[in-house]
Amino acid sequence: FAQDREMVGLRLDDRPPGGGHDGKESGERHFRCEAGLGCFVLKADVELVKRAGQGEDDEDGEAEPFDLERALGRLVGIEAVKQHILSLRNRLEVGRRRAAFGVQDHKPLHTTMVGSKGMDYRGVAEVMSGMFKSLDCTKKDLVVEVSRKDLVGGNTEKTSELVALALKKASGGVLFISDAHAYTEKSDHYGQLALSQLVGHFAEQAEKAAAAAQQAAKDRARAVARGGKPSAAPADTGGDRTVLMLSTQRPKLAEIHATAPALSSVEGTELEFMDYTTEEMASLLAQATEERGFQLHKDLTEAKLLDILRGPVAKCAADRGGKLLVDRLVETAINKQTDRVHMSGTRSKDSLLSLAAEDFEAEEVSASGASIDSVLAKLDGVIGLAGVKKHVKSLVAQLQLAEKKKAAGVMGAKVNATMHMIFSGNPGTGKTTIARLIAELLQSLGYLKRGHLVETDRAGLVAPYVGQTAIKVQTTVESAMGGMLFVDEAYALVKDEKDSFGREALDTLIKLVEDHRDELVVVLAGYPNEMDELMAHNPGVRSRFPTVIMFEDYNVAELTAIAEGIFSKQMMTLTEEARQMLNKKLETMVTSPDVQNGNGRAVRNIVEVALRAQALRLAEEDKSTLRPAELNNLTAADFT
């Protein structure tokens, strides 16, 4: 928004006539203040007044000393990250003492933050910036956050100019690149250029610093050799040093290193961000509400807030959670509260600025936008499979009961049984259809975040070369996170005892199933005998997939209903003779042994053959004598 102009952020004592903000502009935070008391003005339009005792180079005057523990205490969750930062502080402080004895600790300060989108990467960057300034590692407590639009131009020259400008703005402070993986697409030449130039700059600075340290060490060694006293290592006062910080997601980290290989030489710290718990999300929501100048209603207790959050948190996609979800929830709640307040005509401060439970509540729906009842209605609409339907409904009832127990505070409310399943049945018995419906139901019940279905088989999991299979399985599992992974013909994963690639695929899959038991549901599907053999030879499969759902073959009546449903959708009718021919074919199919019985899949094939036969028959008849009704009519001849 500054458009290369120098701007100043002001914290005002009173709200400006046109309304203010809280230090954010165009979705980016530049400083923090109470909501409505912040504004930006051109630097040329204001005068900086020095405080008493403030030096020429001291922009902060007698600022309050930086308190790292206090700053970290304001961050919600991420305890491992906080501990890592404290350890880094300890190393930097001890390193300054070691320097007095001629030992310089040159640990790079550049940091990579890894985790899901929506984590408070910016907040951590601000805390680390304050820490670096307080320890004289940098000159300024400054975080310049840049996104793609700040670094990537329409050509090489413009991109280089933007990179240089970003480095200049952040000089002496922290340059923070959010979503660093956004610059790694192979087709994105200028994005890759920007990232490689930035990292290259810091790699060059690191080489110069290392060379200077080496020279200083040699000088001290010469002094000792001449019988003199070793001098202290030069004090690290930060100077114009700039610290680089990146945020990205774990699966994307390898792409960043491939785009900018020099990152490995400058990266000093990697911080792993664990997703926020529901309790931590409640704290974030309270913070976000206060930052906007609102408050949570006194009747909105912590228990009620947690109940409200469980559904949205469980169903939120991995790339839209954390603070992103909280911001959406608060914004939606403010909109609902505004409509409610407008209708009531209230004018009191408490009612105008208070968000109640009703402002946050929303109807729970599945990933496709359907309610639980509508998904169950679709399940009832599936022909046959009475036993399967009963099992699915019992699963839904179990999860709903557990949720009611949890709301009532009953101990042992959590469903501890794993949801991973084995679908055992012949081809065409509706396994994929049922899997898709179960995924929707689990999502609408809050057990899965996204509720999507990822279908795969041996070809999608087993690679032809050594070292690639585990990566292939990992990638497939990651694509199913928050939903269901459906492995068709799972028995084919391990063909025989010599199938090392297949064995690696199955072992990797079982490990990932265990590691991510609460993040996805895996279904292994296949023929009954083969699936029994797979479980017999792989005890890990049986223990991690305790639920086996049997898909019985369809009987003649069910197959007829499937065929009639297909014909009905295509507006086709059958003569009585044609119906008898169809029934004979279905009876023959039902008496076929096991795998040869194609079930619903075979019915679709019969329908397609009949439709092609009808088209050929009509093409050979005299078109002038054809009646419109015959175009949609199937005869016995079409089923021979």
Image (cartoon, rainbow, N blue to C red):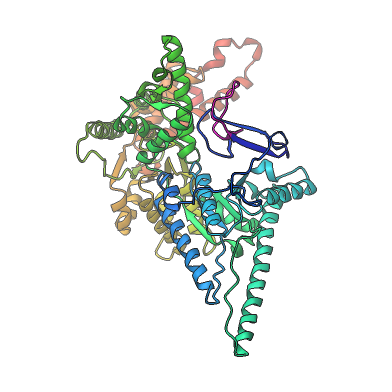
Q: Is residue 601 visible?
A: yes
Residue 22's spot in the image, x, y percent?
54, 32
Left/right of residue 304 with respect to residue 8 in the rendered view: left
Query: Magenta stretch?
Result: 11-26
Q: Residue furthest front?
A: 52
**Where in the figure is residue 248, as x and y percent of width and height?**
55, 49
| Residue 21 inside the magenta-drawn segment | yes
Compared to residue 482, the image places residue 138 above or below, namely: below
Tell me the residue at 62%/46% (across/down): 144
| Relative to 72, residue 233 above or below | below
Q: Quadrant of residue 41?
A: top right
Farthest residue toward the right? 157
Front residue of 598 and 385: 385
Q: Residue at x 42, y 61 (%)?
A: 503
Percent from the top left, x then y, of residue 466? Answer: 52, 64
Task: Report the front residue among 213 and 34.
Answer: 34
Specify whether residue 440 is painted magenta: no
Q: Determine the main secondary structure of the stretch shown in magenta.
A: loop
Q: Quadrant of residue 590?
A: top left
Q: Is residue 615 above or below residue 551?
A: above
Between 236 and 290, the residue placed more toward the observer is: 236
Q: Is residue 494 visible?
A: no
Percent x, y of residue 9: 62, 36
